[in-house]
Amino acid sequence: MADGKAPGEFDLIRLLRERQVVHPAVRLGIGDDAAILSPAAGRELLIAADMLMEGTHFTFPPLTPREAGRKALAVNLSDLAAMAAEPLAAFVTVALPRGRSASFALELHEGVLDAARPFGMSLAGGDTNAWDGPLVISVTVCGQSSAAGPVCRSGALPEDRILVTGSLGGSLSGHHASFTPRVREALTMQQTAPIHAMIDISDGLAADLHHILDESQVAAVLEAARIPLTPEAHRQATAEKPALVRALSDGEDFELLLTAAPDDAARLLALDLPGCPLTDIGSIHAGSGCQLRQADGSLIPLERSGWQHQL
């Protein structure tokens, strides 16, 4: 601050208003008791929320406050991508640990803006408090559906192909804090061909595929040899946890897992998505459960391995 004093809550609000982009759908953002959003005519409003806690979702170090702020919004943007929605506005509530510097709070919120700017979305509200616990960041995002409508988990059909963006495994080496949400890719894919079901991979491929199967009441076969593995998954591989197992269960890849009819899947696979290869990794079938086809052609059950909070 110019007078040398640490910024208070209202100073922080003013600084954020000066730095952010304002989406045209946000008629009224920071500065009043509530925000006003006006989605485009004929579009639906989608809302998602996530809470990240120091010691569970990140630690300092290795993350910086700016990286933590960016991740807090990026994981929510990944949820909007999973439903092929355009981001409009974010609402960020932060419980700051007492004793952390004013620069910590500013850097944290700069990270939120770092994630928002590429998508032209507004930081439209929230709250900031201080307490004696660790850092807690709660983010709520609002998006609007595309003209084709939102994509849910419940639309997978027998004979669908299963596709995945990017590559999987080893995310905690740094990818979990630096990934780019697949918002643009999701919108491009939905404009190209109908997508029956979609989810972002936050808990792990095996766990998140089961979410689609449960909601769609279908079964699946994954092809082990086709699952794209990151270099980090190979580097971290051990006898107890080989690279494929890491791809299936590490989580926080934040790639998109989707299903489409065979002809539509072929059209999607022909897309040029810069820096985001799309891979066919299996098929949807009538029935229930999931199987993994191994290199020798044998099938084994694929359980719901992956991250789950213990309550």
Image (cartoon, grey):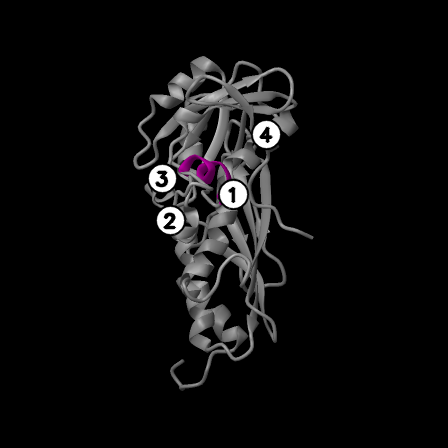
State how far apart marks 1 and 4 are (Cα): 13 Å
Give yes or no for contact between labels 1 and 4 (Cβ–Cβ under 8 Å).
Answer: no
Q: According to the image, label 1 marks what residue?
A: 202
State how far apart marks 4 and 2 are (Cα): 29 Å
State how far apart marks 2 and 3 are (Cα): 25 Å
Give yes or no for contact between labels 1 and 2 (Cβ–Cβ under 8 Å).
Answer: no
Residue, x 57% and y 69% (percent of image)?
134
Residue 137: x and y in percent read 55, 61
Mark in front: 2 vs 3: 3
Residue 285: x and y in percent read 57, 16
SS for callout 1: loop
Query: Where 135 falls versus 56 (above or below)?
Result: below
Using the image, tell me which numbered label, if any, was put on residue 234: none
Q: Identify the amino acid type marked 1.
A: Ser
Mark in front: 3 vs 4: 3
Q: According to the image, label 2 marks what residue?
A: 118
Which sits earlier in the primary sequence, circle 4 or circle 2?
Answer: 2
Which sits earlier in the primary sequence, circle 2 or circle 3?
Answer: 2
Give yes or no for contact between labels 4 and 2 (Cβ–Cβ under 8 Å).
Answer: no
Query: Where 196 falls versus 14 (above or below)?
Result: above
Q: According to the image, label 3 marks what residue?
A: 230
Query: Where 272 falls versus 129 (above or below)?
Result: above
Q: Residues within 10 Å of mark 4 (few under 14, many from 20)?
A: many
SS for callout 2: helix
Q: According to the image, label 4 marks what residue?
A: 212
Decide which of 279, 185 is in the foreground and name it. 279
Decide which of 200, 79 is in the foreground and name it. 200
SS for callout 4: helix
The region drawn magenta spans 243-251
Q: Is residue 219 magenta?
A: no
Q: Identify the amino acid type marked 3.
A: Thr
